[in-house]
């Protein structure tokens, strides 16, 4: 039997409300799980810059979160190296909740810069490494990661990179331990103490690389250039903070 236009309109409106309500309830129900998944992924990436990745892969989610809470102390600084205590809402600043993507869209002078301190297992008052997030552009889309510096704030102790859409087998190799391990032991400072970063050179299988260079990725020159640019940029953004520590920072820093 053919229904009137009024019936069809009412039926459609009612179904829209019902389906919309169900989707809203489902979204709210999944929100805690989604939030925990994002938290786990972020903290795993941070830890992977200072810990053995194979060891991390064998740990359960709760073990990773527990390890993070035990060994990582975090804070947020501005471009001048000063600690930011409160966010825009007047609440305590939480480094893990700072969106690197949103900050990337701002002028460097207006950004919030998280710092993650990897504390010594035997002495939790001693910093083994300082971990900073980095963000930039690869060949096709965003690339990002974390780089960890030893307490000398010169030697790279580890790096963790990720991407949105780099080419499999080429630029996407930045996520592999093979590429990331090339940065371990490299230096970011010149003999004069200036930040010159570490550069991924063009091509692969290069010989005679110095302490500021790592071997490149065949067929992924633009991705490698993106890694170079974001690493140099963010090391420069954190330079004031590093200087503060070297000049005799308090334990809070």
Image: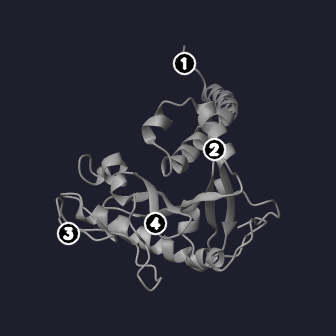
Instruction: Please name the residue shown 63% across and 40% down the image.
Output: 67
Q: Which residue is mark 2?
A: 68
As drawn, 145 above or below 54: below
Q: Which marked residue is nearer to the observer: mark 1 or mark 2?
A: 2
Which circle's residue, 2 or 3, is located before the other in the chain? Answer: 2
Indicate the quadrant containing the N terminus: top left, top right, bottom left or bottom right: top right
Q: CA distance from mark 3 to mark 1?
A: 82 Å
Q: Write down the quadrant of residue 136 in the picture.
A: bottom left
Q: Which marked residue is nearer to the observer: mark 3 or mark 1?
A: 3
Residue 155: mark in rendering: 4
Q: CA distance from mark 1 to mark 2?
A: 64 Å
As drawn, 162 above or below 87: above
Q: Nearer the viewer, residue 182 or 8?
A: 182
Q: Which residue is mark 3?
A: 208
Instruction: Please name the residue shown 65% across and 47% down the image.
Output: 71
Q: Which marked residue is nearer to the observer: mark 4 or mark 2?
A: 4
- Please tell me whether mark 1 sits on a helix, a strand or a loop: loop
**Pointer 1 with pointer 2, Cβ within 8 A:** no
In the image as oriented, which residue stretches furthest toward the right? Answer: 90
In the image as oriented, which residue stretches furthest toward the top? Answer: 1
**Pointer 3 with pointer 4, Cβ within 8 A:** no
- Please tell me whether mark 3 sits on a helix, a strand or a loop: loop
């Amino acid at each position: 039997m053919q229904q009137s236009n009024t019936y069809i309109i009412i039926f459609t409106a009612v179904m829209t409300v019902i389906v919309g309500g169900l989707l809203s309830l489902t979204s709210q129900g999944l929100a805690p799980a989604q939030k925990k998944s994002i938290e786990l992924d972020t903290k795993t990436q941070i830890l992977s810059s200072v810990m053995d990745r194979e060891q991390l892969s064998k740990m359960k989610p709760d073990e990773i979160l527990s390890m993070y809470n035990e060994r990582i102390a975090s804070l947020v600084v501005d471009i001048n190296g000063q600690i930011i205590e409160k966010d825009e809402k007047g609440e305590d600043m939480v480094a893990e909740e700072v969106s690197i993507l949103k900050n990337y869209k701002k002028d460097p002078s207006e950004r919030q810069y998280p710092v993650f301190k990897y504390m010594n297992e035997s002495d939790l008052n001693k910093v083994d490494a300082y971990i900073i997030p980095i963000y930039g552009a690869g060949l096709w889309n965003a690339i990002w990661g974390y780089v960890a510096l030893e307490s000398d704030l010169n030697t790279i102790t580890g790096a963790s990179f990720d991407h949105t859409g780099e080419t499999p087998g080429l630029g996407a190799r930045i996520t592999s331990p093979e590429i990331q391990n090339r940065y371990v032991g490299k230096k970011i400072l010149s003999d004069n103490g200036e930040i010159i970063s570490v550069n991924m050179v063009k091509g692969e299988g290069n010989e005679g690389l110095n302490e500021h260079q790592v071997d490149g990725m065949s067929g992924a020159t633009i991705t490698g250039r993106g890694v170079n640019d974001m690493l140099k940029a963010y090391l420069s953004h954190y330079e004031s903070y590093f200087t503060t520590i070297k000049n005799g920072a308090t334990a809070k820093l």
